[in-house]
Image (cartoon, grey):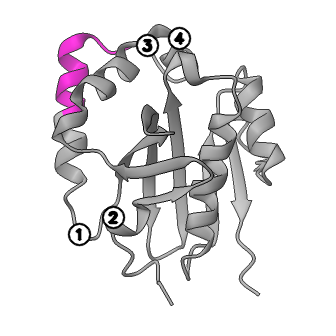
Amino acid sequence: MLSIKTVNADYFQFSSDELSFRLLTSIDEALFCQLFSDAAVMKFISEPFPDRKAHTSFHLATSINNDELFTRLYLVVEHNNTEIGIAAINKIERATGIVEIGRMLLPQYQRLGLGRRLSMALTNRLVAVNGVKIIEKYIDPRNVAAITSAVNIGYKPAENNQQLYYYVVNTA
């Protein structure tokens, strides 16, 4: 069985429910920079990145995507062979079994249910990894659509942090 101690980036290149996930590579710079510099995409995340910061962040993201036992991973998400956004494993704590995920969709693909499907596919992929105990998502409290999506696929709000939602993996 696949273990959190040894799972590598290739495991997260997969297709599910008309969505495909692949590693972010050097060919994805325009998509990455578009997402991180778009005010609508960044509305609940942070200020949009200036052009230089977006490009610098992209080069950092692609360099860490090459780590064999990654601690952070960026994936390009496609719907019907069209790039629609980026999913990320923002952290993977191999010792504790805690994984944090996130997502960003281009504005024209928001509010179509694709974010929920993306989160569900990535959550299901992580649930299949032995040793993953908790999957976390940080969501701005003003982002009602993302909160509703997370709750609908089984995430629960944390009592001590209004931005944290978590999914407990049934290990029985």
**The magenta segment:** 48-58
Marks 4 and 2, how far apart at CA: 29 Å
User: Element under label 3?
Assistant: loop
Type of the residue with mark 4? Ala
Most prominent secondary structure in the magenta stretch?
helix
* Residue where numbered disc 2 is placed: 9
Q: Nearer the viewer, residue 115 or 140?
A: 115
Point 44% across, 46% down: residue: 88
User: Element under label 2?
Assistant: helix
Q: Are dots 3 and 2 in contact, CB under 8 Å?
A: no
In this view, 139 is above or below 102: above
* Residue where numbered disc 4 is placed: 40
Q: Quadrant of residue 43?
A: top right
Point 57% across, 24% down: residue: 109
The crowding category of the residue bearing disc 2, from other C-alpha atoms within 10 Å (few below 14, some 14 to 19, many at least 20), is many
Task: Point out the tag, 4 or 2, that comes first from the N-terminus.
Answer: 2
- Does the stretch in magenta take in 51? yes
Tell me if residue 89 can be seen: no
The crowding category of the residue bearing disc 4, from other C-alpha atoms within 10 Å (few below 14, some 14 to 19, many at least 20), is some
Task: Point out the tag, 4 or 1, that comes first from the N-terminus.
Answer: 4
Type of the residue with mark 3? Glu
Q: Nearer the viewer, residue 79 or 120?
A: 79
* Residue where numbered disc 1 is placed: 68
* Residue where numbered disc 3 is placed: 47
Task: Point out the tag, 3 or 2, that comes first from the N-terminus.
Answer: 2
The crowding category of the residue bearing disc 3, from other C-alpha atoms within 10 Å (few below 14, some 14 to 19, many at least 20), is few
Type of the residue with mark 1? Glu
